[in-house]
Image (cartoon, helix red, strand yellow):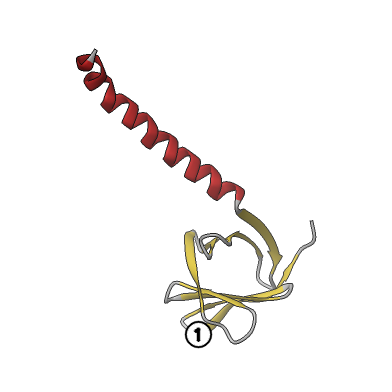
Amino acid sequence: MKKLFILLLPCMLAGCSYYNSLYSAMQDRFQTDTLEYQCDEKPLTVKLNNARQEVRFLYENDMLALKQGMSASGTRYTDGVYVFWSKGNEATVYRHDTVVLHNCRLQSS
């Protein structure tokens, strides 16, 4: 019986590890909101995950993941190059302090 337990233990642990990673991925999906903005230049779809304090969006064929940073007003996310700043129903995207997406307005569902 002990030999069987020793042989099955790695399989049971692997199953727990798989379940935990699957559960974590599902939790992230449920905690992510999709925000649709219409900017002067083009539409912008932003995935907001409050639990992780980050936003993700596609810009110029790059998927950007920006972490929440300090802001005097509104909410600011950055990766050191790009900044997504939102306040109320409006947002702006900067690249190295230059505005690249202007007058982004949150679209109602």
Vertical side of 16 occupied by 40: above or below: below
Residue 72 rendering spot, x and y as whole percentages: 59, 87
Asked whether 46 or 75 is in front, the reply is 75
Which residue appears farthest toward the front when viewing the image?
1
Q: Find residue 79 and report its horizontal and vertical position in percent.
A: 44, 72
Please tell me which residue is depicted at 23% across the width and 19% down the height of the picture.
7
Q: What residue type is labelled 1?
A: Asp
Spot the residue most to the left.
3
Q: Which residue is drawn at 32% across and 31% down?
A: 13
**Is 43 left, or right, of 79 in this rendering?**
right
**72 left or right, relative to 18:** right
Q: Mark 1 points at which residue?
A: 97
Give the x, y percent position of residue 99.
57, 81
Q: In this view, does 10 lie above or below 80?
A: above
Quadrant of the frame with the C terminus: bottom right
Quarter-of-image position of residue 85: bottom right
Position of 102 relative to 11 (above/below): below
Total count of labels? 1
Residue 73 or 93: which is nearer the viewer? 73
- Quarter of the rendering containing residue 43: bottom right
Where is residue 3 shown, x and y percent of the image?
Answer: 19, 15
Q: Which residue is drawn at 50% across and 85% down?
A: 97
Q: Quadrant of the N terminus?
A: top left
Helix, strand or loop status at disc 1: loop
Query: Extreme top residue here?
Result: 1
**Residue at the location (74% across, 72% down)?**
89
Question: Please, is residue 28 above or below residue 6 in the view?
Answer: below
